[in-house]
Amino acid sequence: MTDANSLSGLPYYQLYINGEWNDASNEAAFVTIEPATGEPLARLAEASASDVDRAVKAARQAFDHGPWPHTPANERVKILHAIADALEQQTDVLAELEARDSGATLRKTTFIDIPLGIEHLRTIAELARRHPYEPLPWVDMPSVSWNFVWREPIGVCAQITPWNFPFLALMWKIGPALATGNCVVLKPSPLAPLSTMAVTKIIDELQLLPKGVLNIVNGDAETGEALVAHPGVDKVAFTGSCEVGRKVMASAAQTLKRVSLELGGKSPSIVLPNADFDLAVDGVLFGAFLHAGQYCESGTRCFVPRQQHDAFVERLVGRISGVTLGDPLDLTTDIGPLISEKQRERVESYIRLGLEEGATLACGGRRPANPELRGPYIEPTIFCNVANKSRLAQEEIFGPVLAVIPYDDVTQAIEMANDSVYGLGGAVWSRDLQEAIEVAKRIRTGTVWINDHHLINAVAPFGGYKQSGIGRELGLAGLNEYTQEKHIHVDLMQKRDGRIWWDTLLP
Ligand code: NAD
């Protein structure tokens, strides 16, 4: 992070702890950069371990002694809807901030990220309304009793989000945690924290959450490490890379915190021989290149029947050559920059590797020639005739690079799709829905789209098989990650006589 203390004149965001805005205790700060221009966008206070300690203690106090965990679900839901209403009023502001801070196109943030995130918050809140109570089957042996499960919040949740879709990630984290009565300390990615800060400001102005229920600390690895390791935290919810996910899990193990991890991917798109090619070509490109491929569940490995491989690649190249790289704030731009120069260098190293490994470069692979594109842009890149065992096909690149892999029969396509340490998403392209569902069932990933990609649904569980993660976000499964189950047994006999099991002790 750049030293920010000398940069005045930029918007400045403090830490949000116990319902108050504070500087970092050591007055440290950093800047966030606009990827498209390379210019600083804002300064943010950088939380030290002692600031993290204050935030966790505030959340602890709010959970252990405040009203939030015991507030009836329907009142919490009303507050979340009020937050959603207030966010809706600011859709345009949030969409522009998200585009400038993360490099996503304004078209995407305006029409997808912000409205969808708000809708997800509402859906999660509605799911939570009926969630605490679960009836159990009737039991009258050895006694007549009423049994039910009461789902209670876990406590203080440490939540860590990535830079690639920060607003949506924020809704998916705070939505279920708050709806179920937990208290939160959240740390966004230092590469794109501004929509989180704007949302926090909106929530603060509403004054509907009790103090300490939501706390926001900024910073990078050190701040995150202090948060995950803090003994006052009961649960860690982390979204990011597998590499950091492993560290998070190891650290959380010291005090046996609950952990949910949403990690990386290398998701397959299987084009079956009978697919509608017009649909599949555009769908595979949407799966691979939306947001310059910077999605965890991007369809970065495309399996195509060998006999149709060349024709399919030709059509992919033809369609992608029509997309425009440009300023994310221009509504005609299709693809913006990558998040950082470091990320572009990583992508370029994989393009070199693909060539060394013998894959054929069908298009892209370069920085765009347009000198006006100052940020870390890279052309959409398609490799064909890729070997599934190659590193190009096995490792997460997190950029606009698609590997097309030929297959001989559907069984082989499924086996290759599953030959990966990841298991986050996948797509099947076919006109035969019955066959597509059978293939989907055999793909070992947490989500499979049929004739679609990227559509994450707030009522459905989202998460990874294998090294793509642990636990689920969204849906009832996502709410369960933020609750613990208590069995409550209520005796319905209401008298001493006939309690034969008491008689085994008391004569
Ligand atoms: P990252 O792992 O570098 O960082 C993620 C977050 O962890 C950031 O907030 C970062 O500051 C923080 N962090 C870094 N080191 C830490 C540490 N030692 N302890 C605690 N926190 C630490 O990931 P990124 O580059 O921000 O995001 C890209 C990665 O995230 C990709 O691998 C992508 O696949 C994955 N991702 C997964 C999902 C999902 O839902 N499965 C969604 C988005 C992104």
Image: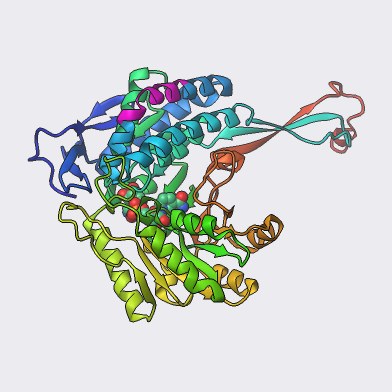
Residue at image position (38%, 56%) is: 293
Main SS of residues in magenta? helix
Residue 280 part of the magenta-drawn span: no
Q: Residue furthest left?
A: 6
Most extreme residue toward the right, as rendered? Answer: 498
Q: Does 91 appear in magenta?
A: yes
Residue 367 lies, in percent from the top left, at 23, 62
Is residue 106 in sight in this rendering? yes
Q: How is the image coloured?
A: rainbow
In this image, 362 relative to 498: left or right? Answer: left
Write down the quadrant of residue 202 in the picture.
top left
Region in magenta: 82-93
Image quarter for residue 358? bottom left
* Residue 329: image location, x then y, percent: 26, 40
Q: What is the x, y in percent for residue 229?
A: 38, 49
Taking the spot 52% from the left edge, 46% from the top edge, the residue there is 455
Q: How many tags in the picture?
A: 0
Does residue 51 appear to the left or right of 141 in the view shown?
left
| Residue 166 quadrant | top left
Q: Position of residue 108 (x, y in %)?
A: 38, 41
Rendered-image quadrant of the C terminus: top right
Give the residue drawn at x 22%, y 48%.
36
Left or right: 153, with 187 as reference point: right
From the viewer's side, name the closer residue of 47 and 205. 205
431 vs 2: above or below: below
393, 355: nearer the viewer:
355
| Left or right: 131 as drawn, with respect to 455 | right
**Frontmost residue, 141 versus 311:** 311
Q: Can see residue 298?
A: no
